[in-house]
Amino acid sequence: MTYRSGDSVRVAERQHVGHHRTPGYLKGKRGTVARVHSTFTNPESRAYGGDGQPPIRLYLVEFEGSEVFPSERTDSDRVYADVFEHWLEPAS
Amino acid sequence: MRLPSSPRVPFRQYIPISEYVKSDYDRAVERAVHDRGGWPTDEPIDRTEHELADWEILMDSIENVLERRGVMNVDEMRRGIEGMPRSQYEAATYYERWLYTTETILVEKGILAAGELDARVEG
């Protein structure tokens, strides 16, 4: 699934044993696509000697501070992170 | 010859995984050793700068050459660090982790023999 700027997304909350670039503190969190970067080779296969094909789209995702760190006073804070497309799910 | 010890930023006290899984930062998704964003702590961030030791600069150079020559890539390098035993990861400095992963990946690829570096260092 491809996303556009402004789309609501959720970071997949799945266990992944092995190299991946999705930080644990964002798994399961909802955010908004802030920017569509481009496509890049897949680090999950390159980390094991693969060629990283096919390339995967990378997004800049914006999260509200209160979504990521609910126990902190972060009303006006935002967290931005680059997340690969296969780690995102549509959120309503 | 032994590697000189480097000036280092001390690691924060190790937090057992059971501790941070309890916090609301984590949703019980198991994390590898490096995946520590959002760990609860009351300690301030240590922002002090430190000089790099010669061996650390050399380690950086070796890693860059290996990448440019296509011997290993940054994802393999990260994977090697993420696969470190937790106790070693916590005890190691930044470039000690680079050394660990470079040796690990080169042995894995058959470029270095297991124990080859140790033998050279001791010899």
Image (tube, coloured by chain):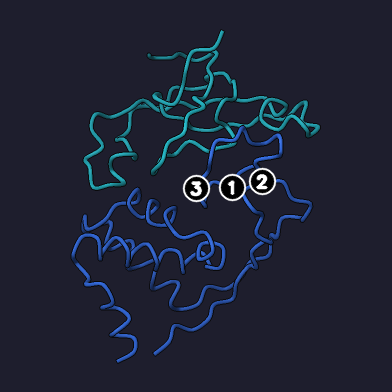
The reply to the same-chain question for discs 1 and 2 is yes
Q: Position of residue A48 (x, y in %)?
A: 27, 47
Q: Which residue is mark 3?
A: B32
- Label 2 near label 1: C-beta < 8 Å? yes
A1 w.r.t. A57: above or below: above
Q: Which residue is mark 1?
A: B36
Disc 1/disc 2 C-alpha distance (Å): 6 Å
Task: Give me the chain letter of mark 2.
Answer: B
Task: Give me the chain letter of mark 1.
Answer: B
Q: Residue furthest front?
A: B18
Disc 1/disc 3 C-alpha distance (Å): 8 Å
- Label 3 near label 1: C-beta < 8 Å? no
B37 w.r.t. A10: above or below: below
The reply to the same-chain question for discs 1 and 3 is yes
Q: Which residue is mark 2?
A: B39
Q: Secondary structure at mark 3?
A: loop
Chain letter of the cyan region: A
- The numbered mark, 2 or 3, whose residue comes first in the sequence reads 3
Q: Residue furthest left?
A: B110
Q: Position of residue B32 (x, y in %)?
A: 50, 47
Chain B representation colour: blue
Q: Residue at x 55, y 13 (%)?
A: A8
- Label 3 near label 2: C-beta < 8 Å? no
Q: Secondary structure at mark 2?
A: loop
Q: Residues within 10 Å of mark 1 (few under 14, many from 20)?
A: few
A57 w.r.t. B3: above or below: above
Picture quadrant of residue A72: top right
Q: Residue at x 53, y 81 (%)?
A: B5
Picture quadrant of residue B56: bottom left
Q: Position of residue A13 (x, y in %)?
A: 52, 27
Question: Which residue is at the front of the view, B93 or A3?
Answer: B93
